[in-house]
Image (cartoon, rainbow, N blue to C red):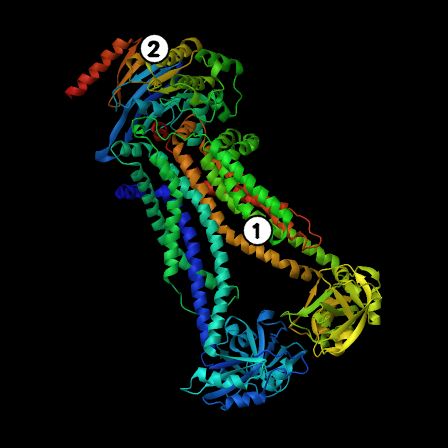
């Protein structure tokens, strides 16, 4: 495996992919989902991954988050190399170091809001840090609804529970898979606001996959993927700048 | 619409698997029973037709050998007159009785009740038409016998060997003159048959010169009915004649009746199994309909009517039922074949015969399989029809019916209450009427509890939740909550187990309670060290009593001998005993007078009889003995009623002179040094090492009286196993559904850090919770029923007290838990192997 020894990279990096490739199938039916992607996700930064469908943005996130296996290259979360880990160790890694926010909220209907938030700690058999938990709950504005079941909450409230769940265990990094995909724009804006606050005020590292330029505009950095490769990167994006960049993909897609 | 149904069946092959299995097992049980009964009854019918094949007319005597003024049977001169009738080829007189053959180790060959002895009746040609000799020839002298082939083989006897044979008298040694085969039904059913010379057999079983029955063979071309007409006028009042055909038909009908009972019992259990299956099928179709909500709504939107929707679901069910019935029928035939070979493995021999496949089992199999499946799918089908067309437009799918359970619960509570009232009323009424109430009550209570079970599931499972969370952490917590997520489905799944366990527990409570009572009664009443009786349950010879009295170390011996005497022309149930000894071997609780007065020729009377007759100590009773001689007896003692004592006791010296052959059923023996191997040997030796006499110690006696209950319980457990297997399939089914429906959740749990082991554990615990819940409901109801039925028989069993078989109940609960673990194996594996990414993405 080749590594790129850049002196100051390691200090602030929460997760890193190096020469990461993911290939499905063999021979003629071979599909390259990720093609030697190298990327660092720096601590206390909100990174958005964008790209047209089929660009490999979700695959990249799944591989870095330890949800999916990869064909070659390496991935590390903090100091831990993922490539050599067995399922059991990967599970433990996800439990202790990673938080997830899904598009479909994915809350357990049998648990109330608070139980859903503390579920990762329950699984780990750890007592939640009460002070931290309170501040997270307060931040997402769920104080009055902790006893409610998911069915009694609106979509926006459910996703806020999901955000709180991801934050509550103080993971090294949070991955969001289209976290605002199922929400109306107001609720989406709220959730994105929480994520940005968690980065700015609490020093949380967040990586999210999105196709919404407005959502991407909340990020510190936007990474653009196409055909399994990183093609561009924008710091301090605005919705317009992201939209412009996306339009170029469309144009290219149409001409090629 | 039918094509849609067909496609649906193929699309959901895997999900319909458990349904098919359940229907298949039920149908196999039904058709197996029917084919087995048909085959067996055919074999028996052929057997009896064969054994009477050569018999033109059979003559049977009903004379009572104890009546001194009558002839005891058919005299030889009558047989001679019959043989002179036109068309008669031969007349064979028969006497029959018990004859046990000892193997070289001195043990009885075969079971006591199937050891027969008869006479060799050679015709003019020196042959007996009923027996075909494969070796040697028939017994014609005092010291000769012949044995059936199988018995000879079991004892490894060959012609010329000395064989010890026990009849009701002492054991004697005979020379084996021949080995034969016969079409005799009893022999073909595994019994042993010893043939004696006619004079020997007559002396042994009846009286010299007399026969109990005779078979008449016809000359070629002669008409059976004509012979019957000619024979009838020759017979005394105490004899009857029938054609061989009539006799064969009668025997066949009798066998049919006997098998009919067996068939009904087995079909009853098959019914229970199928009833349990209904819940599983209904669950499956409910889920299939729920999954297809959008599809069905679309069909409604494009113009399908409600009836068409319902019909399409029912057609799907019918198709499933059809396939399952076909497989089930094949399995049933295999079962029938297996059952027969299984019976012969247990020495329950049945006559050989071909497998009989009549139309009835085929029709029954398909009718039962298809109807049950369609019936079970009927409610889900109706629910499908109620899906509004607009549901096609909703993005939300498979909305769980959160319809209020209020109506259901009210009905359930009312029906349960009605059932409970019936059961309690039955228990307090007692007797047959009481049992009828309990039966009806049990039916309603079971239905009511099944209706109520979804309601019960929440509080009951909430109760055990701490037990789950404590040792199993988050997996336990989630499992507990998952178990009550769909109360209807959990309820239906648990119901299946509850039904089985209600029956199992009810039977266990009843069996153990009655068994314990009988055991206690036996222990309390029998003081003797040993009880001696005939292996066939027949009468012991007087010589056995004499031998025991003389045996070394024996301190007390008393028979319970039937004493026949009439008071006011009605026979009293009385026993002749040995005064002085009887109270040493059995407990006689004298209320007034003294037991010692028996020795003075007085009688002792049980309290209830004394009361009803108005007898007191010192009263005189005029009696008539069996030989019509009269006497006056004085009441010398009154004792408490006991299961082991007749209502009247008398010194055997008083009755013996009036009876030709005493009827001694049991002899109780007390011996110095009590029970020991050496003492047992002393008794066996004293009895002449007779293989036909059994010597039982106290434990044997207890087993003898109480053992039947255990055997019966085990048979019941075996038969109910089928219902339990189907219930297990139901649990597998429900879990597979749950895992399928919760893919996304399980994927999320895996993503946020629940490892495979704990995913498995979560599914397993859910299964355990559902199973144990069903078991607990069943055990509760079963115990209640067991208690109620027990109450109705309590007054017939002295010392009756409810015994809860905690050990067994504990085993049932543990087994239910294991059932859960077992049922969860496959669904849990699937859950753990779920592809996380697909699961999360899947909407």
Which sits in the foreground, B518 or B815?
Answer: B518
- Residue shown at 55%/87% (left/top)? B79
Q: Horizontal placement of B683 versus A230: left or right? A: right
Which sits in the foreground, A195 or B71?
Answer: B71
For the N terminus of chain B, the image quarter is top left
- Residue shown at 59%/85% (left/top)? B197
Q: Where is residue B42 in the image (x, y as percent from the top left)?
A: 43, 68
Which sits in the foreground, A176 or B179?
Answer: B179
* Location of residue A68 by image quarter: top left
* Location of residue B236 by image quarter: bottom right
Q: Where is residue B57 in the image (x, y as percent from the top left)?
A: 49, 81
Q: Where is residue B606 in the image (x, y as percent from the top left)?
A: 76, 62
Query: Image height check: is B685 above or below A127?
Result: below
Report if residue B156 is visible in the image. no
Do marks 1 and 2 both belong to one polypeptide chain? no
| SS at circle 2 | loop
Alpha-carbon distance for marks 1 and 2? 81 Å
Q: Are marks 1 and 2 in contact (CB under 8 Å)?
A: no
Q: Where is residue B723 in the image (x, y as percent from the top left)?
A: 48, 49
* Location of residue B669 by image quarter: bottom right
Report if residue A140 is visible in the image. yes
Of all chains, the one bearing label 1 is B
Would you name the residue on which mark 2 appears? Answer: A220
The numbered mark at residue B436 is 1
| SS at circle 1 | helix
For the C terminus of chain B, the image quarter is top left
Of all chains, the one bearing label 2 is A
């Amino acid at each position: 495996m080749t590594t790129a020894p850049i002196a100051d990279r390691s200090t602030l990096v929460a997760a890193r992919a190096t020469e990461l490739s993911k290939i499905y199938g063999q021979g003629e039916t071979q599909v390259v989902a990720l093609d030697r992607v190298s990327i660092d996700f720096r601590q206390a930064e909100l990174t958005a991954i964008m790209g047209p469908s089929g660009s490999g943005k979700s695959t990249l996130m799944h591989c870095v988050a330890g949800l999916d296996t990869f064909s070659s290259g390496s991935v590390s979360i903090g100091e831990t190399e993922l490539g050599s880990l067995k399922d059991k160790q990967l599970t433990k890694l996800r439990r202790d170091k990673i938080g997830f926010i899904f598009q479909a909220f994915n809350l357990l209907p049998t648990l109330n809001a608070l139980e859903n938030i503390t579920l990762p700690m329950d699984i780990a058999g750890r007592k939640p840090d009460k002070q931290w938990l309170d501040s997270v709950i307060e931040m997402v504005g769920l104080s009055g609804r902790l006893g409610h079941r998911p069915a009694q909450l609106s979509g926006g409230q459910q996703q806020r529970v999901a955000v709180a769940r991801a934050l509550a265990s103080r993971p090294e990094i949070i991955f969001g898979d289209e976290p605002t995909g199922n929400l109306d724009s107001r609720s989406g804006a709220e959730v994105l606001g929480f994520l940005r606050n968690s980065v700015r005020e609490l020093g949380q590292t967040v990586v999210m996959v999105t196709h919404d330029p407005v959502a991407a505009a909340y990020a510190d950095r936007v990474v653009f993927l196409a055909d399994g490769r990183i093609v561009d990167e924008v710091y301090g994006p605005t919705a317009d700048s992201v939209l412009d960049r996306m339009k170029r993909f469309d144009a290219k897609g149409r001409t090629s | 619409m039918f094509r849609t149904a067909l496609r649906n069946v193929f699309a959901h092959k895997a999900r319909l698997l458990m349904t098919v299995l359940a229907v298949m097992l039920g149908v196999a049980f039904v058709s197996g029973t029917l084919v087995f009964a048909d085959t067996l009854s055919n074999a028996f019918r052929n057997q009896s037709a064969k054994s009477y094949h050569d018999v033109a007319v059979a003559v049977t005597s009903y004379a009572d050998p104890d009546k001194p003024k009558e002839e005891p049977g058919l005299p030889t001169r009558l047989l001679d007159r019959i043989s002179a009738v036109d068309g008669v080829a031969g007349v064979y007189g028969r006497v029959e009785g018990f004859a046990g053959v000892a193997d070289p180790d001195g043990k009885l060959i075969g079971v006591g009740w199937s050891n027969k002895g008869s006479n060799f009746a050679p015709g003019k040609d020196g042959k007996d038409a009923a027996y075909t000799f494969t070796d040697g020839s028939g017994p014609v002298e005092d010291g000769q016998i012949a044995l059936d082939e199988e018995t000879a083989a079991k004892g490894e006897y060959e012609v010329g060997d000395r064989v010890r044979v026990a009849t009701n008298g002492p054991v004697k040694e005979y020379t084996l003159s021949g080995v034969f085969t016969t079409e005799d039904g009893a022999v073909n059913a595994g019994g042993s048959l010893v043939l004696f010379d006619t004079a020997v057999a007559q002396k042994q079983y009846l009286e010299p010169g007399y026969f109990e029955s005779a078979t008449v063979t016809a000359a070629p071309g002669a008409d059976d009915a004509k012979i019957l007409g000619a024979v009838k006028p020759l017979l005394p009042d105490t004899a009857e004649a029938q054609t061989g055909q009539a006799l064969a038909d009668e025997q066949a009908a009798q066998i049919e009746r006997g098998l009919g009972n067996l068939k009904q019992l087995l079909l009853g259990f098959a019914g229970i199994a199928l009833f349990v299956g209904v819940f599983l099928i209904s669950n499956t179709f409910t889920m299939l309909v729920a999954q297809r909500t959008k599809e069905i709504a679309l069909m409604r939107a494009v113009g399908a009517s409600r009836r068409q929707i319902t019909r399409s679901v029912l057609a799907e069910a019918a198709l499933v039922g059809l396939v399952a019935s076909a497989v089930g029928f094949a399995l049933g035939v295999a079962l029938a074949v297996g059952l027969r070979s299984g019976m012969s493995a247990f020495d329950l021999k049945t006559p050989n015969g071909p497998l009989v496949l009549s139309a009835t089992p085929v029709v029954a199999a398909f009718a039962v399989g298809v109807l049950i499946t369609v019936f079970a799918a009927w409610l889900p089908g109706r629910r499908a029809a109620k899906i509004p067309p607009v549901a096609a437009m909703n993005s939300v799918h498979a909305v769980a019916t959160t319809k209020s359970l209020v109506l259901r619960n009210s009905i359930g509570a009312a029906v349960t209450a009605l059932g409970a009232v019936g059961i309690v009323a039955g228990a307090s009424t007692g007797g047959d009427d009481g049992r009828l109430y309990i039966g009806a009550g049990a039916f309603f209570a079971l239905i009511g509890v099944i209706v109520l079970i979804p309601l019960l599931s929440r509080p009951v499972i909430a109760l055990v939740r701490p037990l789950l969370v404590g040792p199993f952490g988050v997996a336990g917590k989630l499992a507990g909550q998952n178990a009550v997520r769909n109360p209807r489905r959990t309820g239906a799944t648990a119901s299946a187990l509850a039904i089985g366990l209600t029956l199992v527990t009810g039977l266990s409570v009843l069996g153990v309670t009655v068994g314990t009572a009988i055991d206690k009664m036996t222990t309390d009443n029998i003081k003797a060290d040993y009880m001696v009786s005939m292996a066939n349950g027949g009468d012991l010879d007087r010589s056995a009593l004499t031998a025991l009295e003389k045996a070394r170390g024996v301190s007390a011996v008393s028979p319970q001998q039937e004493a026949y005497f009439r008071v006011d022309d009605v026979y009293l149930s009385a026993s002749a005993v040995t005064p002085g000894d009887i109270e040493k071997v059995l407990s006689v609780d004298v209320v007034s007078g003294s037991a010692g007065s028996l020795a003075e020729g007085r009688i002792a009377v049980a309290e209830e009889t004394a009361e009803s007759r108005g007898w007191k100590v010192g009263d005189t009773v005029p009696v008539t003995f069996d030989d019509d001689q009269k006497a006056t007896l004085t009441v010398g003692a009154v004792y408490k009623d006991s299961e082991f004592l007749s209502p009247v006791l008398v010194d055997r010296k008083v009755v013996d002179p009036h009876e030709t052959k005493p009827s001694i059923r049991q002899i109780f023996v007390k011996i110095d040094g009590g029970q020991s191997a050496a003492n047992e040997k002393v008794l066996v030796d004293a009895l002449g090492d007779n293989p036909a006499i059994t010597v039982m110690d106290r434990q044997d006696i207890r087993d003898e009286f109480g053992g039947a209950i255990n055997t019966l319980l085990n048979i019941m457990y075996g038969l109910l196993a089928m219902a339990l297997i189907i219930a297990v399939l139901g649990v597998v089914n429900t879990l597979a559904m749950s895992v399928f429906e919760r893919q996304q959740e399980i994927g999320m749990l895996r993503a946020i850090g629940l490892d495979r082991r704990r995913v498995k554990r979560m599914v397993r615990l859910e299964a355990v919770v559902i199973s144990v819940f069903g078991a607990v409901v069943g055990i509760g109801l079963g115990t209640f029923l067991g208690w109620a039925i027990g109450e109705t028989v309590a007054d017939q069993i002295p010392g009756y007290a409810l015994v809860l078989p905690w050990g067994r109940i504990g085993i049932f609960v543990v087994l239910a838990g294991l059932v859960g673990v077992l049922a969860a194996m496959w669904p849990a594996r699937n859950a753990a192997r779920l592809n996380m990414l697909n699961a999360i993405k899947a909407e």
